[in-house]
Amino acid sequence: MLIALLVMSVLALLLGAVLGFSAIKFHVEGNPLVDKIDAILPQTQCGQCSFPGCKPYATAIAAGEAEINRCPPGGEEGIQKLAELLGRDFVPFGEDTAAQKPKSVAVIDENTCIGCTLCIQACPVDAISGAAKQMHTIIEIECTGCELCVPPCPVDCITMAPLPQTIQNWKWQSPVHILAVSK
Amino acid sequence: MTSYLLILISTVFVNNIVMVKILGLCPFMGVSKKLEAAISMGAATTFVLTLASGSSYLIEHFLLAPLHLEYMRTLSFIVVIAGIVQFTEMVIQKTSPVLHQVLGIYLPLITTNCAVLGIPLLNVQEKHNFIESLFFGMGGAIGFTLVLVLFAGIRERLEGADVPGIFKGSAIAMITAGLMSLSFMGFAGLVK
């Protein structure tokens, strides 16, 4: 009886020591889930999800503080990928976030632009080229369509122009939403 | 050499742990909805079962038998298997993130499922030596993987089939599992 107690205690202590030691020695840094969610988000850093960037939104999703339907640039495809990664149900865009808009780029009306550089400071991806009292212009390939430059302009010269569909960028519409409704 | 081959054939087909011995049904029903999950689960179970068979043989023959503590078998097996699998998961997570991606998340799930405890206990009952225990564990897990993959394939087909309302989901899966078990009984008598 006593031997049994002794053997079990020694076994338990030994295993506990091994596990404790290896928990410290083989500790893996970082939360891999947040990185995986961040890899799905479009990295627009536009803030339309009400978080200051894609990584904070990913952290909030991982902590369960945010719904997965808050990212318009990711579109419904992004929500579907997040739902698959996290094992949650697909949620369509709600009332509090803007729905998915067609991909667009900003356009500066050069007749109205006064060269104040307020839009250059607002752009998170550095897609506006210009300097103080010089003409500003949008570099089209860099623009992600996040619309952060539209409010700061004092003369309201920035508009969003939808990207035309050409043979090069046409894709089949993802039937994600239709599947979700029919289930 | 033939005895090892015999052990393999008997554990994979004749005495399949899921279909004939009816062990390990929780992961069998739970992880067989998608084919990729089933394959990863089978790989993780193979790893765990081989490790568990080996370590429990060592515990039985170098700790329990000499000290006449055979009644502690279940307790000590579970403790040792759980500890070793946890340790291995930590090592895999650190050394190979790719491998951890494939089978890491399933390791805690199968640490103490009834098949992982049952196979070492059966090893003791059948009085296998060390190598035979390893083969028994590995063969059992290969049989588990085989059945899991087959069932996942059937279940993916069932999703699109015209199943009556009350039978949809788990009910038709259970019935299918029963029919599969019936078919595996055809292997009885394969090894004379």
Image (cartoon, coloured by chain):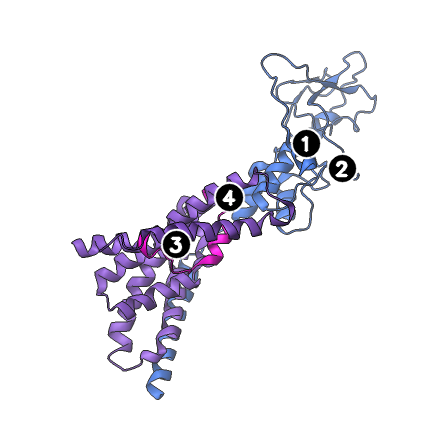
* Residue furthest out toward the right: A155
User: Mark 4: which amino acid?
Assistant: Arg
Reading the image, the residue beneath label 3 is B45
Q: Earlier in the sequence, mark 1 or mark 2?
A: 2
Callout 1 and callout 3 share a chain: no
Subunit ID for the residue under disc 2: A
Q: Give the range drawn in magenta.
A: B12-36
Total marks shown come to: 4
Residue A97: which numbered mark, if any?
2
Residue B84 image position (x, y, % from top left):
37, 63
Per the image, the residue denoted by label 1 is A178
Q: Where residue B151 sits: x, y (%)?
A: 45, 46
Q: Position of residue B122 (x, y in %)?
A: 32, 66
- The quadrant in which the C terminus of chain A is found is top right
Please tell me whether residue B16 belongs to the stretch shown in magenta.
Answer: yes
> For the residues carrying marks 4 and 3, which lies nearer the camera in this image?
4
**Chain holding disc 3:** B
Q: Are callouts 1 and 2 both on one chain? A: yes
Indicate whether A169 appears above or below A15. above
Please say if the residues under marks 1 and 3 sit with CB atoms less than 8 Å apart: no
Residue A121, quarter of picture: top right
Q: Residue beneath label 4, please?
A: B155
Q: From the rendered image, report the letter of the chain displayed in purple.
A: B
Chain A tint in image: blue
Crowdedness near tag 4: few (<14), some (14–19) or many (≥20) residues, C-alpha within 10 Å: many
Give amino acid for label 1: Ile
The dot on residue B50 is: none
Kindly identify the residue that appears in the image at 73 percent across and 27 percent down.
A147
